Image (cartoon, helix red, strand yellow):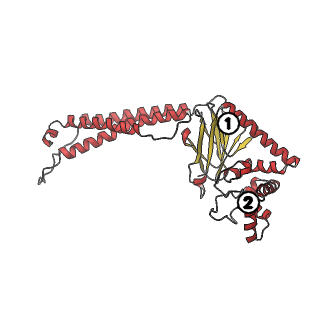
């Protein structure tokens, strides 16, 4: 067998590399590498990835086949301690192994550049969405649509979107895996990223930059909806923002408190509260806050109002058991006015009054 392999090594290596390349390409293309494709860019990027795989399999498999073939066919006979024949220079081989990788790498670089240029191309009339990262939550606002603010992202299908990404504190990274879209949120800079969602559904917004103790909890949702549903959502949100303002001015404290909870305060990104339809469990649920505020307030000799207020203003002074310090942003005293904090405290206590834990 080995004698046979030694006789026609070039043919043998070519057959082995060829066969294992075919098997290798079938395997890598059968693997489902990425999540759902939900943007136009995701399709182009996944095709690029497949081309990269198809190009790299023969390189890896070809090199390994030649090496294994040689190890088997040309290994020394038992007891043979003599040196191998000295070989130097093989111009034809050297030209081949420089030219082929040069052509492959250049072609892939050009293809990659074309795809990048295409997915980053300037759009006419995109929907602008400002994205703000903060330890440890995302906020989104729609400057063209009545200053609508939200802690979840809602986007219309098939409309170009331009995200302008900022941070209030440290580095974060705005990432929607289903869009194949990712950009750093850098202090002092606005980074831009463009995308066209093309599949209705619910996806995750993830923070992809280690930003502190709550990094892994810094998640939100993207809802890609039909254009008409998006218009309806914007109309509803801008009305409730207006209601919040009017309510605060006109004395409807509950509506004003709810507007702060879901809007400017961003509380709904982390806390469950049935009255505000929020279900996030990053921080303690607030449906039984009145009872809890009595219990924990007693320990620290605070009234329920004082307890809730200090929990908003200095969240790390006391942390509810099973939750961690350093997760809740410590700057609500700067983010919200004293009146807004009072409104929020009253709202939270009123909606949780009488509920037993
Ligand atoms: Cu923000 Cu990790």
**Quadrant of residue 245 within the rendered picture:** top right
Q: Nearer the viewer, mark 2 or mark 1?
A: 2
Mark 1 Cα-neighbour bin, 10 Å: few <14, some 14–19, many ≥20: some
**Quadrant of residue 356 within the rendered picture:** bottom right
Give me the C-alpha separation between circle 2 and circle 1.
37 Å
Q: Which residue is mark 1?
A: 128
Q: Is residue 157 above or below residue 302?
A: above
Name the residue: 87% across, 47% down: 249
Name the residue: 64% across, 61% down: 326
Label 1: state its secondary structure: strand
Query: Mark 2 or mark 1: which comes first in sequence?
Result: 1
Q: Which residue is mark 2?
A: 289
Name the residue: 64% across, 65% down: 321
- Give percent across and percent down for residue 7: 14, 37
- Give percent across and percent down for residue 232: 72, 34
Q: Looking at this view, is 52 or 33 the one in front?
A: 33
- Give percent across and percent down for residue 316: 68, 63
Mark 2 Cα-neighbour bin, 10 Å: few <14, some 14–19, many ≥20: many
> Which residue in the rendered view is the most extreme toward the top?
124
Total labels: the figure holds 2
């Amino acid at each position: 067998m080995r004698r046979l392999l030694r006789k026609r090594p070039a043919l043998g290596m070519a057959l082995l590399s060829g066969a294992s390349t075919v098997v290798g390409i079938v395997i890598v293309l059968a693997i489902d590498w990425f999540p759902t494709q939900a943007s136009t860019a995701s399709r182009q990027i996944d095709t690029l990835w497949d081309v990269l795989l198809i190009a790299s399999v023969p390189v890896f498999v070809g090199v390994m086949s030649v090496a294994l073939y040689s190890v088997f066919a040309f290994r020394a006979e038992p007891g043979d301690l003599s040196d191998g024949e000295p070989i130097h220079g093989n111009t034809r081989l050297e030209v081949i192994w420089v030219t082929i990788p040069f052509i492959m790498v250049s072609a892939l670089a050009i293809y990659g550049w074309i795809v990048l240029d295409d997915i980053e191309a300037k759009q006419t009339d995109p929907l602008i969405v400002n994205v703000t990262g903060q330890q440890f939550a995302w906020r989104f606002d729609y400057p063209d649509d009545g200053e609508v603010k939200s802690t979840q992202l809602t986007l219309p299908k098939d409309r170009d979107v331009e995200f302008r990404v900022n941070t209030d504190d440290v580095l974060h990274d705005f990432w929607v895996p289903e869009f194949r879209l990712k950009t750093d949120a850098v202090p002092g800079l606005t980074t831009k990223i463009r995308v066209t969602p093309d599949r209705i559904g619910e996806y995750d917004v993830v923070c992809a930059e280690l930003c502190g103790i709550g990094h892994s909890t810094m998640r939100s949702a993207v809802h890609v909806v039909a254009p008409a549903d998006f218009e309806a959502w914007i109309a509803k949100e801008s009305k409730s923002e207006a209601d919040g303002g009017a309510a605060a001015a006109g004395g409807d404290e509950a509506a004003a408190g709810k507007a702060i909870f879901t809007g400017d305060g961003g509380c709904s990104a982390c806390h469950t509260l049935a009255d505000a339809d929020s279900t996030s469990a990053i921080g303690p649920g607030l449906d039984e806050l009145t009872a809890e505020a009595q219990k924990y307030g007693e320990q620290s000799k605070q009234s329920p109002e004082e307890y809730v207020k200090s929990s908003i203003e200095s969240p790390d002074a006391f942390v509810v058991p099973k939750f961690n310090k350093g997760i809740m942003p410590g700057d609500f005293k700067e983010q919200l006015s004293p009146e807004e904090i009072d409104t929020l405290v009253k709202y939270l206590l009123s909606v949780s009054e009488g509920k037993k834990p």
